Amino acid sequence: MTNLLTEIHIADGSMYNTMQIPDSLYKYGTAKYLLVFRTFHTDSLQFKKSMKYYSRKPDLLAKMYEQVATNLKQKSDSLNKVSQIQIAKDTKRREDSVKKLPKQPVQAKTADTVKAKLPAKPFNYKRFYPVKHRPNVDPIK
């Protein structure tokens, strides 16, 4: 029962990624719960009966939920460990890629080189000036 509850809570947690519209929760949630029930060879009616039984015995339910909490913690720790390993591999691969790049010479920027790169004429920004109204122009007939 603790493994079933663990998987049910994982399915509940995965529902936070979907939009919280009742129709979408029903559509996506039902399939997840049915998959969990099929995995543990049970159905929703048997699950409800079991939860009703254990809710009458809070000491057993508390012990079960302690085990569920440790199971969830172990699963999250293993996922964190895998993700840290993947991040370390990606970082090493990036560093190796950067080392393999050819070295480019760095030029010192002096006043002479900056002046040499400036254009000879200033930029012409006429398109940003307001259009002048010319009253002497004949309108189009």
Image (spheres, grey):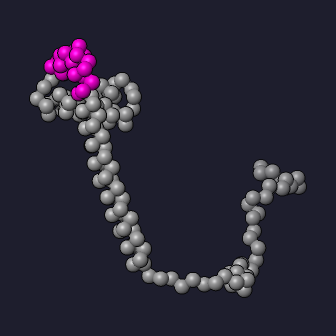
Q: Quadrant of residue 8?
A: top left
Q: Position of residue 74 (x, y in %)?
A: 27, 43
* Viewport quadrant of the N terminus: top left
Determine if the magenta segment contains residue 55: yes
Q: Nearer the viewer, residue 40 or 52?
A: 52
Q: Is residue 128 above or below residue 64?
A: below
Q: Is residue 8 visible in the rendered structure shown here?
A: no
Residue at (36% x, 68% y) in the render: 92
Determine if the magenta segment contains residue 27: no
Q: Quadrant of residue 75?
A: top left
Q: Position of residue 131 (x, y in %)?
A: 80, 55
141 relative position to 108: left or right: right
Q: Is residue 73 above or below residue 38?
A: below
Q: Is residue 116 above or below residue 11?
A: below
Q: Is residue 66 above or below residue 122?
A: above
Q: Main secondary structure of the magenta part?
A: helix
Q: Is residue 66 visible in the rendered structure shown here?
A: yes
Residue at (23% x, 13% y) in the render: 56
Q: Nearer the viewer, residue 28 or 58?
A: 58
What span is colored magenta in the figure? 45-64
Residue at (44% x, 82% y) in the render: 102
Residue at (25% x, 20% y) in the render: 59
